């Protein structure tokens, strides 16, 4: 029973955080950020590229996902735009993991670069 209360408490805290995030974004954003988001994510392929680059830069697909939830909740981004960004986010995560998985060796030293 205690675990159920922990899960419910965690969900309540998460939803509270998303609500506060979207309130803050509404106040902070204004028209300029909405114009940028519209320009960068108006087509699915542009949204995917944006998602992949953003994931590579911040190294956290979870942070990008929570931020997108806040943007959608604040009416700064549509669900259609977010789907493209989510696809790019997953691609960016996969590419980042694949780059790390490569065994890069410097030929002169015979030692791994990474």
Image (cartoon, rainbow, N blue to C red):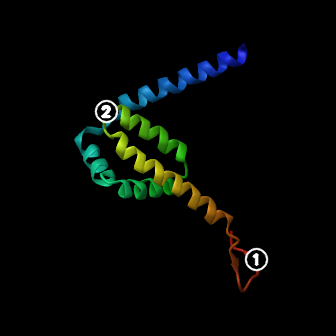
In this rendering, the count of numbered labels is 2
Report the side of 42 relative to 62 (left or right).
left
> Which element is circle 2 on?
helix
Q: Residue furthest top?
A: 1
- What's the mark number on residue 93? none
Provide the residue designation for mark 2. 26
Query: Which residue is at 68% across, 74% downward?
Result: 104
Quarter holding the N terminus?
top right
Q: Residue furthest bottom?
A: 108
Report the side of 74 relative to 14 (left or right).
left
- What's the mark number on residue 111? 1
First in sequence, mark 1 or 2: give its number: 2
In space, the residues marked 1 and 2 are separated at their CA atoms by: 50 Å
Quarter holding the C terminus?
bottom right
Q: Residues within 10 Å of mark 1 (few under 14, many from 20)?
A: few
Relative to 45, is 27 above or below?
above
Report the side of 67 relative to 93 (left or right).
left
Residue 88 location (% of width, % of height)? 46, 54
Which residue is more in the foreground, 19 or 51?
51
> Which element is circle 1 on?
strand
- The quarter holding residue 79 reads top left
Q: Residues within 10 Å of mark 2 (few under 14, many from 20)?
A: some
Q: Residue furthest right?
A: 110
Query: Which residue is at 35% across, 35% downward?
Result: 25
Residue 11 location (% of width, % of height)? 56, 24
Query: Which residue is at 38% across, 31% downward?
Result: 22
Relative to 72, is 3 above or below?
above
Residue 46 location (% of width, % of height)? 36, 57
């Amino acid at each position: 029973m205690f675990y159920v209360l922990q899960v419910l408490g965690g969900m309540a805290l998460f939803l509270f955080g998303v609500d506060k995030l979207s309130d803050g974004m509404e106040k902070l954003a204004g028209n300029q950020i909405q114009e940028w988001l519209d320009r960068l994510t108006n087509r699915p392929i542009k949204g995917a590229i944006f998602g992949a680059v953003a994931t590579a830069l911040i190294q956290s697909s979870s942070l990008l996902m929570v931020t997108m939830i806040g943007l959608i909740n604040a009416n700064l981004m549509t669900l259609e735009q977010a789907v493209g960004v989510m696809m790019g986010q997953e691609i960016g995560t996969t590419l980042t993991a694949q780059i790390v998985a490569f065994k890069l060796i410097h030929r002169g030293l015979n030692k791994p670069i990474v």
